[in-house]
């Protein structure tokens, strides 16, 4: 079962934990059940089906990381020249340099009481990877990073995955780092 972890704070051992920003006790949330319940609540006839692909398993690196080019896939979205988010959200490839000042994340789900997305590096680790390249731990960083929307059907996800794979091949990417938010 795939689970996420949320944190709650209890003021004494006998109290039931309540949510708060100062984490103390983990409580697991089943995102599979949560997604199925959401789909049922909004009226879908069939429960949510998680995408699977038995032919594309995780594989060992073909060469050392210090010789590999890394690409980043994020679920955040770019802002346009007008400062507004690019909508509708769609898959994209965007230059890693110059580094974007911010990405649109307001429509995504995370514990907004416990954290924020003001720190671009927390969900788009371009600067950290550039440091790893400079230190010789990573061969190189792709000249572009790639974006993938999250509110999706399997059909759309497969089309976007093909598009991102094409971009990664164009950029000679060896390893992809998935950074969902």
Image (tube, rainbow, N blue to C red):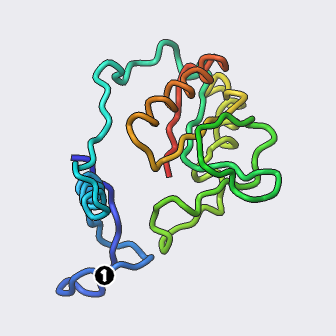
x and y percentages locating residue 73 in the rendered image: 56, 37
Nearer-the-camera pick, 160 or 135: 160
> In front here: 118 or 146?
146
Q: Position of residue 141 (x, y in %)?
A: 67, 28
Residue pictured at 33% horizontal, 60% vertical:
5
Q: Nearer the viewer, residue 65 or 73?
A: 73
Q: Residue at point 44% right, 30% down? A: 158
| Quarter of image, res 106 | bottom right
From the top left corner, tell me how far across and down residue 11 is, in percent.
Answer: 30, 87
Furthest residue in direction left, as rendered: 14
Residue marked by disc 1:
18
Does 112 sit left or right of 77 as displayed? Answer: left
Q: Secondary structure at mark 1?
A: strand
In the image, residue 35 lies at what x, y percent? 30, 55
Q: How many marks?
A: 1
Q: Please identify the quarter of the rendering in which residue 9 is found.
A: bottom left
How would you rate the neighbour count of disc 1 (Cα within 10 Å): few for under 14, some for 14-19, many for 20 or more?
few
In the rendered image of this protein, does residue 14 appear above or below residue 54? below
Specify whether 81 is left or right of 8: right
Relative to 129, is 41 above or below? below
Viewer-proximal residue among 45 and 10? 45
In the image, residue 127 sits, relative to residue 59, either above or below, namely below
Residue drawn 30% across and 31% down? 52
**Measured along the vertical axis of the image, is residue 73 above or below residue 171?**
below
């Amino acid at each position: 079962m795939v689970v996420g972890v949320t944190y709650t704070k209890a003021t004494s051992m006998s109290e039931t934990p309540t949510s708060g920003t100062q984490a103390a006790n983990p409580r697991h949330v089943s995102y599979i059940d949560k997604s199925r319940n959401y789909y049922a609540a909004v009226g879908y006839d069939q429960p949510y089906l998680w995408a699977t692909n038995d032919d594309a398993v995780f594989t060992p690196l073909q060469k050392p990381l210090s010789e590999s080019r890394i690409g980043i896939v994020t679920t955040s979205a770019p802002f346009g020249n007008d400062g507004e988010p690019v909508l509708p959200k769609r898959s994209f490839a965007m230059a890693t340099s110059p580094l974007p000042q911010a990405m649109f994340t307001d429509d995504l789900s995370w514990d907004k009481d416990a954290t924020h997305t003001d720190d671009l590096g927390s969900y788009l680790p371009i600067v950290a990877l550039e440091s790893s390249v400079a230190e010789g731990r990573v061969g190189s960083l792709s000249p572009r990073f790639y974006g993938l929307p999250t509110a999706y059907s399997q059909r759309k996800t497969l089309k976007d995955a093909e598009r991102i794979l094409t971009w990664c091949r164009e950029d000679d990417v060896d390893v992809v780092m998935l950074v969902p938010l």
